[in-house]
Image (spheres, grey):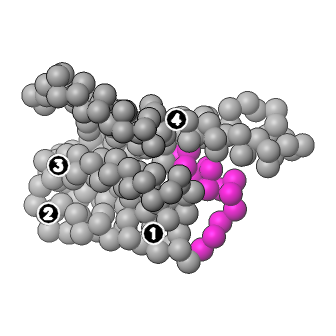
């Protein structure tokens, strides 16, 4: 949560400012908050994929649930890997804390997918998702895409991160402790603010 509010949303604002400079004098200048809309659509996309996967959760549709999750999380992880190498960070420390936040996020997603998909995930899924992060990173090194498109990808990722943080890291059904949540959120916020 600290990463979302202290780092992700301000970065989205910086990307928004960048896109506004690029698309001036075009059709899109009539639409304010372009990337916030894209982030909202990214949130809706990942939330919709999750709902679709859960709606197919019967014995005969178990393979479809698995496939939907693997496709959506592979793209999501590849996007994170791509942005890790193509995004401009405030030095090695900024990259390290992005890596740390995403690492914790990946662990949370891993536990959730393992609970939901069980043996299929342990056998193939976790390897596919791990490889997709590396593939995204390799694509980020090999291919340079325009700055405005990176901003759009970042906005889609922001929506995906927000929905996954809310879905996986604050679930009601888990026996979570508010004190631990508060200490973690405040501690990580302090670290991000000190950067």
Residue positioned most to the bottom: 142
Residue 50, position in %: x, y?
Answer: 34, 42
Circle 4 sits on which residue? 9
Residue at the spot 43% in from the left edge and 38% down from the top edge: 194
Per the model, the C-alpha gap separating discs 4 and 2 is 33 Å
Q: Quadrant of residue 5?
A: top left
Along the polypeptide, which appears first: circle 4 or circle 2?
4
Crowding at mark 4 (Cα within 10 Å: few <14, some 14-19, many 20+)? some
Task: In the rendered view, tell whether residue 47 sits above or below residue 61.
Answer: above
| Disc 3, SS | helix
Which residue is at 62% across, 36% downward? 13
Q: Along the polypeptide, which appears first: circle 2 or circle 3?
A: 3
- For label 3, the residue is 111
The residue mark sitting in front, 1 or 3, is 1
Crowd rating for badge 1 (residues with CA inside 10 Å; few <14, some 14–19, many 20+) = many
Give the residues in magenta: 143-156
Residues tagged 1 and 3 counted as in contact (Cβ below 8 A): no
54 left or right of 95?
left
* Mark closer to the chain start, 1 or 3: 3
Can residue 69 be seen?
no
Q: Which mark is residue 80?
A: none
Per the image, the residue denoted by label 1 is 137
Q: Position of residue 152 (x, y in %)?
A: 62, 49
């Amino acid at each position: 949560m600290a990463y979302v509010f202290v780092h992700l949303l301000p970065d989205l604002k910086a990307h928004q400012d960048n896109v506004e400079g690029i698309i001036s004098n075009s059709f899109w200048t009539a639409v304010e908050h372009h990337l916030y809309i894209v982030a909202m659509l990214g949130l809706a996309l990942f939330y919709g994929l999750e709902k679709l996967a859960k709606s197919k959760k019967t014995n005969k549709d178990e393979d479809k649930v698995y496939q939907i999750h693997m496709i959506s999380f592979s793209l999501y992880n590849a996007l994170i890997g791509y942005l890790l190498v193509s995004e401009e960070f405030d030095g090695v420390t900024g990259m390290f804390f992005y890596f740390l936040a995403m690492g914790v996020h990946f662990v949370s997603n891993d536990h959730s997918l393992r609970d939901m998909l069980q043996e299929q995930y342990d056998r193939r899924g976790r390897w596919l998702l791990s490889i997709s992060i590396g593939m995204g990173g390799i694509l980020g090194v090999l291919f340079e895409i325009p700055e405005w498109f990176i901003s759009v990808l970042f906005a889609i990722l922001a929506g995906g991160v927000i929905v996954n943080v809310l879905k996986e890291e604050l679930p009601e059904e888990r026996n979570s402790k508010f004190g631990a949540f508060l200490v973690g959120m405040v501690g990580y916020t302090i670290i991000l603010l000190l950067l």
